[in-house]
Amino acid sequence: MTRDCMTSFEKFGVVGGGAWGTALAQLLAAEGAPVRLWAREEDVVAAINAEHRNPLFLPGAALSPSLTATSDLGTLSGLDALLVVVPVPYLRAVLAALPAGDAPLIFCSKGMEAGSFDFPIDIAREIFPGRGFAVLSGPTFAHEVAAGLPTAITLAAENPALAEGLARALARPHFRPYVSTDMIGAEIGGAIKNVLAIACGIVDGAGLGLNARAALISRGFAEMTRFGLARGALAETLAGLAGLGDLVLTCTSSNSRNFALGQGLGRGESAAVLMADRRTVAEGAFSAPVIAAAARADAIDMPITDAVARLVAGETRVADAIQALLSRPLRPEGR
């Protein structure tokens, strides 16, 4: 029986010691199950092992003693499945350094690689042809998952047996995965919602009101749908937890790093200064120019995404970007 057909997964590892990686590791270790987490930062590894905390990325969360950290990727061999929670700009290098094996990789990072226009699954297929893959994406704040608050999320894998087996292994009374076979839809929803969250934060920071934010969420979802359908995603995935659900969460709370970055931009602060001052990554800042370039290459109309890309790059001012969006020609709502 291959790993793809397994119906039981017991030994998990997590690749990435940021807030989301730590929260997922804690989810799996909360009842005493052994979980191994790889982190690049030696101080994160030391704090998790000695103090059962991650003060750098997830302050305030008490971690289970059964969660152990390592800075050696080689120690992740022999596990049943790995959750990969590495920012997309660094993903290819980390995957190339993983130990050989057939354990399925569950991708939890959100974004698109510059230059190649690859999503995490595309990168993984180049490095590990034939290995089992899944995508975990949906409306989640890491600190709430770590605290055991109710959460629903999409677990997508092309192999339905793999998706169902992983969903059963990851499910907890407060953590409910919904199974899908649409990995590309789950990845697209997660990547684009981060860009749109920056846009909604700009609206909030600039004091443009709730009407404007609601309009931006709706028109942003239209952009997500256009891009997703053009790349083979299913409409129901984009309208579900990994698309619309995640969009609503991140576009309405400053707990979102992307929304908070947008708030700063809306107040007139410099993107370079805002991003240099952050320990954690606002993934939308990296994704916006890549997705905008991919959309232009495929002639997909994404004006909000393009505006965010230019704002993050410092190529335009907030007032000018808003004026450009508001002065676009009138058109039917479905376009």
Image (spheres, rainbow, N blue to C red):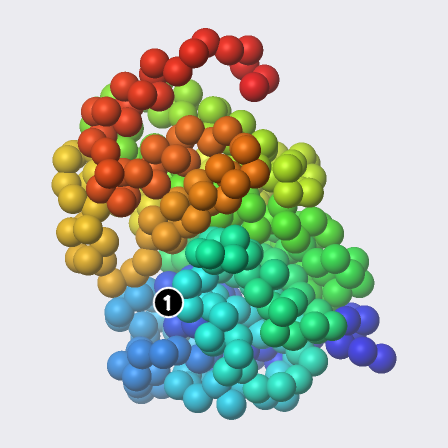
User: What residue is at 32 percent from the left and 65 percent from the top?
Assistant: 58
Quadrant of the drawing holding the N terminus: bottom right
Q: Vertically, is 201 above or below 94?
A: above
Q: In this rendered view, identify the residue nearer to me: 335 or 245.
A: 335
The image position of residue 156, as x and y in percent, is 67, 55
Answer few, some or many: residues within 10 Å of disc 1's Cα (few below 14, many 20 plus, some between 14 and 19).
Answer: many
Q: Secondary structure at mark 1?
A: loop
Residue 102 appears left or right of 272: right
Q: Amino acid at mark 1?
A: Gly
Q: Vertically, is 185 above or below 122?
A: above
Residue 49 appears left or right of 246: left
Task: Read off the residue under disc 1.
Answer: 18
The image position of residue 214, as x and y in percent, is 41, 23
Q: Quadrant of residue 33?
A: bottom right
Q: In this rendered view, identify the residue nearer to me: 137 or 87.
A: 87
User: What residue is at 21 percent from the left and 24 percent from the top?
Assistant: 319
**Does residue 223 appear in the picture of this structure?**
yes
The image position of residue 54, as x and y in percent, is 31, 72
Q: Quadrant of residue 317?
A: top left
Q: Vertically, is 216 above or below 109?
A: above
Quadrant of the drawing holding the C terminus: top right
User: What residue is at 23 percent from the left and 24 percent from the top?
Assistant: 320
Residue 278 appears left or right of 62: left
Residue 89 appears left or right of 46: right
User: What residue is at 67 percent from the left and 78 percent from the top?
Assistant: 103
